[in-house]
């Protein structure tokens, strides 16, 4: 048995999510809030548009960094939560590989991106494919999957680098394809830094 | 139609029969065509460039015998299926003096393909080196998975192709999937393969290599490709032998992408 995406998605979809001062899912031990994707995309679009040409790469890295910081801490909250333990861990038979499968299934279940693992060389490389992610609808130029870049790097750090919180910045993620530039899907490749 | 014995083939020389080139028409296609039209006779084959000769005899859809050089029976047929260059000549009404196979054309092709697979594995003298070399070659010349999927779709009888991760994530799909919820198919395949692999582990046998699911005439054929699973949907089970043969190399190629 390995982690089955449909089982994870169906189980997580049954959880009642109701926001209060502790956020939407207090069990993750990080504040998860509901924000319209339009807001996030507009923020990225404006900050990139405002950046002078020689600073664009730096601003882009900043956007990825924001997603990374969020993904690293939220990701740790997710994979150590009671929900994850109840739903995903009973199906884990292939260690970190299955944890990552479960993490992307959870990511899909919460509506962040319909994404999953295409290739995985343990501790070395991971290729992610995403068919639906909110940044695909953003305006601008070039590949703009900042959130998935940061998050994929964070997930791989959590799985294969030093234990939380010492494993930050061990891996790096680059985007090779994007729906926003006309490709049929977004592709994200994580490798050692 | 008068039936000639093999020894009297010369008498049939005046018969133009059906002739062609193996680079344009594969032997499996030819056999499929002739058996579907209930023809009886002999296919004479010559491989290029070495001139090796082969013969296949069949009667009304049943494959009676096959010879390829010194090889005969299923071994001979397996050898002939691997021919890619050469010519063929179908001569109707010629019967074989011997019966070395005696199976339906479809069944015989399936058995020959299995034999071919087994021989290929046995003949791999240094598998690690070969895999490394092939891997290097693929890195240099490798095609994208979408391109390989499109080639799979061009094989007659294949309706749709889907590649799913072991967790049921649909990585890629192509073809007519209007009848199928592709996410449901991916999840179902992953669950089925998981069950089969658990059974294999319990029985202490090798990893699963093929799975065929029959639904009336339609068949879903699944194979592992790298760390993922590829499945082809065919609405016509009678073409399964040919499909299995023609997809072999493409599945291997697909395995390098996942």
Image (spheres, rainbow, N blue to C red):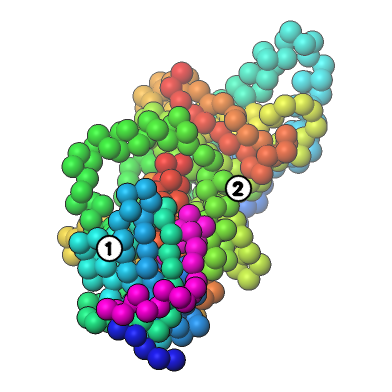
In this view of the protein, can residue B221 be seen by the observer?
no
Which residue is the extreme one toward the bottom? B1
Residue closest to the eye, A158 or A127? A127
Q: Name above or below for residue A97 compared with residue B91.
A: above
Element under label 1? Answer: strand
Q: Identify the residue under disc 1.
A: B68
Q: What residue sits 30% from the left and 56% below the top?
A: B52
Is B153 colored magenta in this rendering?
A: no
In this view of the protein, can residue B91 be seen by the observer?
yes
For the C terminus of chain B, the image quarter is top left
Q: Identify the residue under disc 2.
A: A114
The residues colored magenta run B6-27
> Do tags 1 and 2 sit on the same chain?
no
Chain label for disc 1: B
Is B17 colored magenta in this rendering?
A: yes
Q: What residue sits 61% from the left and 60% below the top?
A: B175
Q: What residue sits 26% from the left and 67% below the top?
A: B67
Q: CA distance from mark 1 to mark 2?
A: 52 Å
């Amino acid at each position: 048995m390995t982690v089955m995406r449909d089982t994870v998605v169906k189980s997580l979809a049954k959880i009642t999510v109701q926001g209060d001062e502790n956020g939407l899912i207090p069990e993750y031990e990080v504040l998860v809030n509901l924000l319209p994707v339009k807001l996030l995309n507009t923020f990225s679009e404006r900050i990139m548009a405002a950046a002078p040409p020689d600073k664009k790469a730096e601003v882009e890295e900043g956007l990825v960094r924001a997603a990374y910081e969020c993904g690293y801490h939220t990701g740790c909250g997710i994979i150590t939560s009671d929900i994850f333990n109840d739903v995903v861990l009973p199906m884990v038979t292939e260690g970190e590989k299955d944890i990552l499968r479960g993490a992307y299934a959870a990511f899909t279940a919460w509506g962040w991106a319909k994404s999953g693992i295409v290739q995985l060389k343990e501790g070395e490389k991971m290729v992610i494919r995403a068919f639906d992610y909110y940044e695909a609808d953003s305006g601008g130029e070039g590949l703009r999957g900042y959130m998935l870049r940061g998050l994929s790097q964070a997930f791989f750090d959590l799985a294969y680098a030093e234990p939380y919180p010492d494993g930050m910045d061990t891996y790096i993620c680059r985007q090779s394809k994007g729906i926003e530039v006309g490709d049929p899907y977004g592709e994200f490749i994580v490798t050692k830094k | 139609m008068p039936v000639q014995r093999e020894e009297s083939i010369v008498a049939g020389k005046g018969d133009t029969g059906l002739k062609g080139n193996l680079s344009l028409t594969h032997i499996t296609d030819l056999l499929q065509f002739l058996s579907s039209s209930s023809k009886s006779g002999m296919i004479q084959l010559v491989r290029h460039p070495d001139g090796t000769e082969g013969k296949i005899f069949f009667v009304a859809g049943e494959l009676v015998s096959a010879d390829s050089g010194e090889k005969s029976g299923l071994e001979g047929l397996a050898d002939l299926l691997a021919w890619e260059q050469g010519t063929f000549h179908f001569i109707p009404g010629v019967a074989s003096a011997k019966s070395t196979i005696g199976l339906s054309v479809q069944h015989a092709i399936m058995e020959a393909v299995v034999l071919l697979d087994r021989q290929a594995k046995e003949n791999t003298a240094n598998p690690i080196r070969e895999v490394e070399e092939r891997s290097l070659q693929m890195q240099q010349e490798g095609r994208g998975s979408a391109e390989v999927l499109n080639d799979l779709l061009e094989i007659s009888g294949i309706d749709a192709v889907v590649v799913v991760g072991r967790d049921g994530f649909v990585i890629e799909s192509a073809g007519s999937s209007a009848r199928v919820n592709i996410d449901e198919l991916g999840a179902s395949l992953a669950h089925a393969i998981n069950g089969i692999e658990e059974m294999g582990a319990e029985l202490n046998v090798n990893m699963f290599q093929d799975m065929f699911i029959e639904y009336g005439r339609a068949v879903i054929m699944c194979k592992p490709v790298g760390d993922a699973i590829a499945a082809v949907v065919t609405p016509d089970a009678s073409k399964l032998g040919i499909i299995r043969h023609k997809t072999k190399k493409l599945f291997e190629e697909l395995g390098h992408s996942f």
